[in-house]
Image (spheres, rainbow, N blue to C red):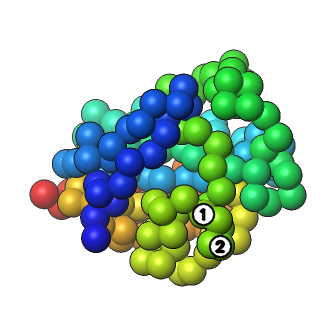
Amino acid sequence: MSVHAFTVKSNDGKDTPLSAYAGRVLLVVNSASECGYTPQYKGLQGLYETFRGRGLEVLAFPSNDFGAQEPGSDAEIKKFCELRYKTTFPLFSKVPVKGTAAIPLYQHLSAQKGGDVRWNFTKFLVDRKGQVVGRFEPSVAPDSAELKAAVEQALAQP
């Protein structure tokens, strides 16, 4: 199944079909505003700015699943990200990302690569056809050579 088959809620509550991103490479990340990895928002924005012209989209899904580190409302999360980290990539509604409570998209991502998400800022790389081609744990920074190389490889594919 393709990631493009799923519909998710945008940060403002609107249904967003991921088919709208068909033909683009996606980096799907579960985020949190009060985590030790929260500064990765800056790196994600940098990655987005570097590669979006070549077809990369960063899709952030805030989640309160780990240590209650995302207590804010969708509006508060958006304001935090934009003011603190100057994010411009798509931000979606706060969702559960692990176990049976996970939204269908995250159930699919986890089933494709590595099982349940274990912490905030786990990153899934999805190719232009909607197939999950990589998973990067939170310790892999957005500006790491490993992640950049994987993004470059995915962007090079038709």
Q: From the top left corner, tell me how far across and down residue 57 is, in percent.
A: 38, 42
Residue 102 image label: 1
Amino acid type at mark 2: Gly
**Residue drawn at (41%, 61%) of the image:** 125
Q: From the top left corner, tell me how far across and down residue 6 is, in percent.
A: 36, 54
Q: Is residue 54 above or below residue 78?
A: below
Q: Is residue 26 left or right of residue 66?
A: left
Q: Is the Cβ of the residue at disc 1 closer than 8 Å to that at disc 2?
A: yes
Q: From the top left corner, tell me how far across and down residue 123 is, in percent.
A: 54, 60
**Residue drawn at (54%, 38%) of the image:** 92
Specify the quadrant of the image occupied by residue 126: bottom left
Does dot 2 land on a helix, a strand or a loop? Answer: helix
Q: Is residue 141 left or right of residue 111?
A: right
Q: Is residue 82 above or below residue 5?
A: above
Residue closer to the observer: 102 or 119 = 102
Q: From the top left corner, tell me how far across and down residue 11 is, in percent.
A: 55, 31
Amino acid type at mark 1: Ala
**Residue drawn at (28%, 70%) of the image:** 1
Which residue is under mark 2?
A: 99
